[in-house]
Amino acid sequence: RAAATARSPWPYASALITGMSGLPDARRKSRLCRRLSRWMRMPVTRVWSCWKGHWKVVKMKRILTGDRPTGRLHIGHYVGSLKRRYKLQEEGNYDEFYIMIADSQALTDNFDNPEKVRKNVIEVMLDYLAVGLNPNKITFFVQSEVNALTELTYYYMNLVTLPRVLRNPTVKSEINSKNFNESIPVGFATYPISQAADITAFKANIVPVGDDQEPMIEQTREIVKSFNRIYDTDTLVLCESLLPNNIYQRRLVGTDGNAKMSKSLNNCIYLSDDKETIKEKVFSIKTTSRRIDEPGIIDGNILFMYLEAFCEDIHFKKYYSEFNNLDELKIAYQKGGIGDASVKRFLTEVINDELTPIRERRREYAEDLEKVYNILKEGTKKAKKTADKTIVEVKKAMKLNYFEDSEYLNELLNSK
Ligand code: TRP
């Protein structure tokens, strides 16, 4: 049975409607949605209209994403993911939105340094609030507090082979860069499986992430399909990644030109950096030396990679009015006559334009840490409830629900 394919609501739905006359409207609707979801093998939140057999159903949108709390967030996180989250929040076109601080996952390569993880949980939470993410619209939570996630991970581990885990390109490159050699911790190698638990526990179908997380989404989809097939169920929901718009945003290079902005490489611009620091970092970016009147080269030019990721036409109006947009600047730069210093000055303004309100909001929240702490605490409570519901369904599908299942006792009694 192809459990993951959606079925048409027709003709099942009309039978449902006839069978449910008499219930009050809201209850009738929610029951209809629940039963339709089961039939269609996809979550349905709203049934808009039914008219002579023409149905308009709205697929439920549940968004989930997260970050490892190993340091403050930087502008790579911002263009790669945080900005998109903010946009999704403002569009409001979703049913549930979860953002997880992945402390358990952070431990998989920091198990000997829990203090680092502990300290950064609140820093990351501050960064979220600073970029404008709103706790009334998004549920923020801490991974390690949600027990269901570890439980799910353990069950999912049976569905993934060892070679498959080690084939994950992101895990592969991380293993190489960390010099684990032969002594790779099992927890580290298998963290994509726990990521599948994070996503499926909330039945998320949309996961906004950067490029490097694409293999995790693929792994999750494989687990969902295997689980639903093996246990003949439709409990788990297939997810899709939502990637940033352009390649520069998907993976922002470091200020030293390294392919990834990363704390350990010391090549980051942090959301919390002040104006002076940003200026210093931007002016320290290396470009090929040339005389001003010589043509500039865009290819491989870090300054332009940052501009591609960050700037909008409005920035030109405000800070570089000789040009209307990035294309015009690029043409002039390639012709010659534009020095790197003026591009750096412009880039500094652009980054500051984005980061100034963020910095200010961060400072305000940092003055009320108890409030921030409580946001995370309340969110975690709510997340726990949702994940617990899923684990009940998962165990039922796996027939591990002995004490909720009266059939089980009957079987025992009858088998004598
Ligand atoms: N692996 C992600 C990162 O390194 C964090 C993460 C953990 C995550 N669980 C997730 C992201 C689930 C999206 C969905 O940033």
Image: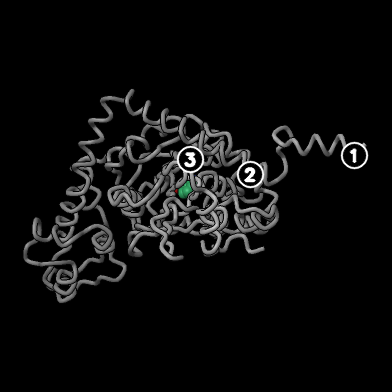
The answer to whether the residue labelled 3 contacts the one labelled 1, judged by CB atoms less than 8 Å apart, is no
Measured Cα–Cα span from mark 3 to mark 1: 46 Å
Residue drawn at x 23%, y 32% is 363
Q: Secondary structure at mark 1?
A: loop
**Category of crowding for the residue at label 3, using alpha-carbon neighbours closer than 10 angstroms: few (below 14), some (14–19), many (at least 20):** many
Q: Amino acid at mark 2?
A: Val
Q: Is residue 319 or residue 142 the one in the foreground? A: 142
135 horizontally vs 311: left or right: right
Measured Cα–Cα span from mark 3 to mark 2: 22 Å
Tag count = 3
Can residue 316 be seen here? The reply is: yes
Does 278 sit above or below residue 140?
A: below
Q: Is residue 193 or residue 55 the one in the foreground? A: 55
Residue drawn at x 55%, y 51% is 19
State the quadrant of the C terminus.
Answer: top right
Check disc 3 and report the residue beneath it.
Answer: 102
Please tell me which of labels 3 and 1 falls first in the chain.
Answer: 3
Q: Amino acid at mark 1?
A: Ser
Query: Which label number is shown at residue 415?
Result: 1
For label 3, being within 8 Å of ligand 1 is answered yes
Q: Amino acid at mark 3?
A: Ala
